Amino acid sequence: MADIAIVGAGHVGVTYAAGLAALGHRIRVLDIDGARLAKLRRGKLWFFEPGLAELLTRGIARRRISFTTRYRIALKGVQFVFVCVSTPTTPDGSLDDSSIRSAFDQIKAHAGNPPPIVINKSTVPVGTGDAALQIFAQTDIKVVSNPEFLSEGRAVEDFFRPNRILIGSRDREAARLVANLFRPLHRRIVLTDSATAEVAKLASNAFLATKISFANAFARIAEEVGADVDELSRTLSLDPRIGPGHLTVGLGFGGSCLPKDIAAVEQLARRFGASYELFAAVATINREQRRRIIDFLLKTWGAIAGRRIGVLGLSFKPNTDDTRESPAVALVEELVAHRADVCVYDPAVRSAVRGATTVRTALAAARRADALIVATDWPEFRSLDLARLNGTMRGNVLIDARGVWDAARARELGFTYYSYGRGGSPRGTS
Ligand code: UDX
């Protein structure tokens, strides 16, 4: 069993702390935010992630996880240091690696002897692994790149059952030692160099973003020719060369990874004159999804000002309270900018959007609304009784921006129903 420090108590850091503790390791979690750590110490998360609080609590109860704000304490006697700090987008689209660099400097200053292996989990500008080698050049500290592929809302499952574990390093021995940490998971481990690992992470998220925008671009065509986008996505998914997942048409992608990473890839491609237009188009298509809803409302009503609009969902996807880069939030902001009277309900998000009213139930959002919009596909929205909604709304516009309702049924009930490329043809395959 190893002693491991984890730098950064965010989504990734806390998931790895709880997961590695469950595998039997002793973990010290470091963060500069003492209040955040105080909460974690009590087994409470500062974000929403199914199953993680329980796993964390178990690790703490077994005395396998402790917390500190001090590098000297975190690094004492550890064999591994996972760096899980954030890398936000800079104004030109590239990734800001200042937190990573500062973590490397601190590790260099406080590492014990024998020196630990530093494992970088954050999504970083390509070349960070080599830059780290320079930073640690005068020391015996080894560096390994091990990008994370955790998906929010299913991070615990992704920790224990990753579809691949990517380890990049020029140092074969260091890579082998890091690989050993994950061997009990019995999952596929890919050993490569650090640049390949760094690019693979960006490429993976850029591909997912491209798949979503591809599906959304086809929704536009489907709409014009009367094809059904859900049947289309299902058919595409059946081809193993295309594969399932990330083909659901909707309001677009958000979150802390996909928008940031597609911007970083575009910036990287621009730097080398390498077909950056592809990645720019992915981001443009994503933004257009919101505009299409605004256009639909304008076409239906002539003006949006003064209309009462209920919006269901604010998080960037279900099973999380994360609103970073959420298309739902951006849509609400645009509706507010059009001077609509917007009423929002989300099962997990507690923060409000300026200019919009927050309510506690989906029905409250629908009450006396001229239009109701599903902006995030939380499971509870699927089971809403459309007839009941019809009774509580004053208007009849239903915008299903995540494809959660049956188009034919909504139209039967007299709703003016819009959902990208879901014209209401009968569902099901035979
Ligand atoms: C993503 C990657 O999946 C993960 O591997 C990586 O480590 C981090 O980025 P995450 O940001 O948690 O994970 O979200 P993901 O499930 O990929 O969804 C991203 C966005 O795309 C969400 O806003 C979601 O609503 C949207 N989406 C997803 C679609 O619009 N259509 C789809 O078919 C799938």
Image (cartoon, rainbow, N blue to C red):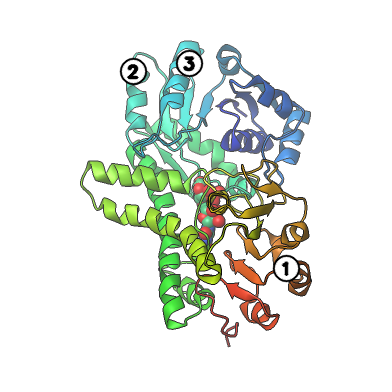
- List x then y, in percent, for residue 409: 68, 80
- The total number of labels drawn is 3
Can you tell me whether the CB of the residue at mark 1 lies under 8 Å from the nearest atom of ligand 1? no
Q: Choose the circle earlier in sequence order: 3 or 2.
A: 3
> Which dot marks residue 394?
1
Q: Residues within 10 Å of mark 2 (few under 14, many from 20)?
A: few
Q: Tag 1: residue type? A: Arg
Q: Tag 2: residue type? A: Ala
Q: Tag 3: residue type? A: Gln
Q: What separation in Å lies between label 3 and label 1 (alpha carbons)?
A: 59 Å
Q: Choose the circle earlier in sequence order: 3 or 1.
A: 3
SS at badge 3 = helix
> Which dot marks residue 310?
none
Q: Is 346 situated left or right of 226 in this image? A: right
- Residue at position x 42%, y 68% in the image: 242
SS at badge 1 = loop
The residue to which callout 2 is attached is 137
The residue to which callout 3 is attached is 106
Q: From this view, report whether residue 41 is shown above or below residue 259.
A: above
